[in-house]
Image (cartoon, rainbow, N blue to C red):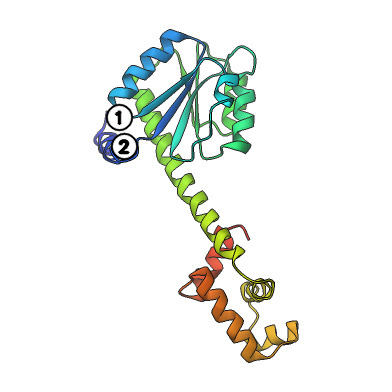
């Protein structure tokens, strides 16, 4: 393991002491689940194992950083079918596929659908840990992005209908005078609404406000 990976792992473990990232393991092979649980438990992760996709889907959703080790050849709902479902329901959970045999078309399909890695059993511990650390770092970024989006949308929800109209025109590049003409109100009133928008959105500048609109998907 190179120095960069070792440093990344140490940094991850430091954060894990505060809020352990969760690794979900979905595999119908009990020996695989147990060996992964033992390895990842020593690494400071919280591990939750499931024997099938259906049993995982019954589990309550968690919003913290996480990733999934997913057997592609599950009985019932397959790994690929679960991946498709999670792409909509839990987009901040990267998936690492594990399989007992190589199947090029299936691997291509899984990777095109967003899988971050594809490991063939029996896999090397270091290769598994490296893939998990990369997946968790990606998840942390996605979780932070989603939390920011939700916070921005919460602030946006506090705007009045008129303030939302003003915000929309601000982000389109309209000047105060032009906004007044567009909405049929005075420039002084526009300035008042604009001030309220900046205050409620907690934006320090026009540039920050515009970035918020993009980050919040408004």
Labels 2 and 1 touching (C-beta < 8 A) = yes
Between the residue at mark 2 and the residue at mark 1, the CA separation in whole angstroms equals 6 Å
Residue 113 in which image quadrant: top right
Q: Is residue 103 left or right of residue 137?
A: right
Image location of residue 78, percent across then percent down: 62, 18
Please report the residue visible at 52 percent of the width from the left and 14 percent of the height from the top: 51
Image location of residue 181, percent across then percent down: 73, 87
Other-residue count near label 2 (Cα within 10 Å), few / some / many at <14 / 14–19 / ≥20 = some
Image location of residue 143, percent across then percent down: 47, 45
Please report the residue visible at 58 percent of the width from the left and 25 percent of the height from the top: 58
Other-residue count near label 1 (Cα within 10 Å), few / some / many at <14 / 14–19 / ≥20 = some
Image location of residue 24, percent across then percent down: 46, 26
Q: What quarter of the picture does the C terminus occupy?
A: bottom right
Please report the residue visible at 31 percent of the width from the left and 37 percent of the height from the top: 16
Residue 138 in which image quadrant: top left
In the image, residue 192 sits, relative to residue 210, either above or below, namely: below
- Secondary structure under the numbered disc 2 in the rendered image: helix
Find disc 2 in the rendering and name its residue: 16
The one nearer the camera, 122 or 160, is 160
The one nearer the camera, 191 or 214, is 191
Q: Earlier in the sequence, mark 2 or mark 1?
A: 2
Find disc 1 in the rendering and name its residue: 44
Please report the residue visible at 70 percent of the width from the left and 86 percent of the height from the top: 180
Residue 217 in which image quadrant: bottom right
């Amino acid at each position: 393991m190179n120095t960069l990976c070792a440093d990344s792992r140490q940094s991850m473990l430091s954060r894990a002491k505060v809020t352990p990232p969760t690794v979900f393991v979905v595999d119908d092979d009990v020996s695989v689940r147990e060996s992964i649980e033992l390895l990842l438990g020593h690494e400071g992760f919280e591990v939750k194992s499931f024997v099938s996709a259906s049993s995982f889907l019954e589990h309550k959703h968690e919003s913290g950083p996480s990733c999934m080790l997913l057997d592609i050849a599950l009985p019932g709902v397959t790994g690929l079918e679960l991946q498709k479902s999670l792409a909509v329901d839990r987009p901040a959970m990267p998936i690492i596929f594990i399989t007992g045999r190589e199947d090029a078309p299936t691997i291509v399909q899984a990777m095109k659908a967003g899988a971050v890695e594809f490991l063939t059993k029996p896999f090397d511990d270091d290769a598994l840990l490296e893939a998990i650390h990369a997946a968790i770092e990606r998840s942390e970024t996605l979780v932070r992005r989603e939390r920011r989006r939700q916070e921005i949308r919460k602030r946006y929800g506090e705007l009045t209908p008129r303030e939302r109209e003003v915000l929309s025109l601000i982000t389109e590049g309209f000047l105060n005078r032009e906004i007044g003409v567009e909405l049929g109100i005075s420039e002084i009133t526009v300035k008042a609404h604009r001030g309220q928008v900046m205050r409620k959105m907690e934006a320090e500048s026009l540039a920050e406000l515009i970035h918020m609109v993009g980050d919040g998907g408004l």
